[in-house]
Image (tube, grey):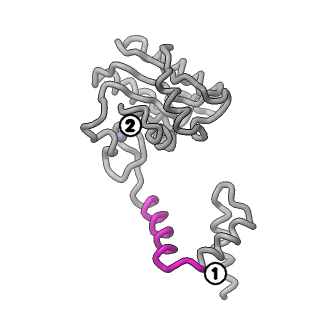
Amino acid sequence: MEQGIIENLINELTKLPGIGRKTAQRLAFFILTMSDEDAKGIAKAISEVKDRARFCRECFNITDKEICGICSSSARDRETICVVEEPSNILVIERSKGFDGLYHVLLGTLSPIDGFTPDKLKMSELVERVRKNSIKEVIVATNPNTKGEMTAQYIRELLKPFPVRVTRIAYGLPIGGDIEFADEVTLGKSLEGRREI
Ligand SMILES: [Zn+2]
């Protein structure tokens, strides 16, 4: 029985990315030594995120409300939208403190070969926001790889009919890389050095 419950925890932990059997074992035995409060705090946070997390109706960031904290903040510049591929990219850009506008999450990147056509992404929602809210600048912060570039060019074309400046963040980031792994300073500089596309 005792073997059963710890074995079960190890199996569950191996479902996480980057966690092999050995690491899972170490984590499982570490969790055993944690205080009740700490261990249950982890379980509760996982359960809450699954129960309450949803997409912001405006920008498709992850939130537990209808409209996320960034979209509902009065301190943000509401005429600039930074377009990212995934909600996790917002966390990285926020940490860089180089941006105080709004975001728009595409929930993916263009890749027709894998079935990621524009209608599978939040493209028409972006156009709607630009059209309705007199947006002055759209900064495209998709990843510096082929799909990210293709996505940026597509957005450029899509927004041609509107009087909006479309820029792409300058990459001091390695080409073919992922903004997920960029440090805050590099990302802050990429935002500063953005250029028109
Ligand atoms: Zn939002």
* Callout 2 amino acid: Cys
Q: CA distance from mark 2 to mark 1?
A: 41 Å
Residue toward you, 84 or 113: 84
Read off the residue under disc 1. Answer: 5
Q: Residue at x 32, y 51 (%)?
A: 65
Badges 2 and 1: C-beta atoms under 8 Å apart? no
Q: Which residues are magenta?
A: 33-50
The answer as to whether callout 2 falls within 8 Å of ligand 1 is yes
Neighbour tally class for label 2: few under 14, some 14-19, many 20 plus, Cα within 10 Å: many
Residue toward you, 42 or 107: 42
Is 180 left or right of 69, judged from the image as shown? right
Is 83 left or right of 175, judged from the image as shown? left
Image coordinates for residue 15, horizontal then vertical, percent: 65, 61
Label 1 residue SS: helix
Q: Which quadrant of the structure image shows residue 126?
A: top left
Residue 59: which disc? 2
Q: Residue at x 38, y 49 (%)?
A: 63
Residue located farthest toward the left when viewing the structure as drawn? 74
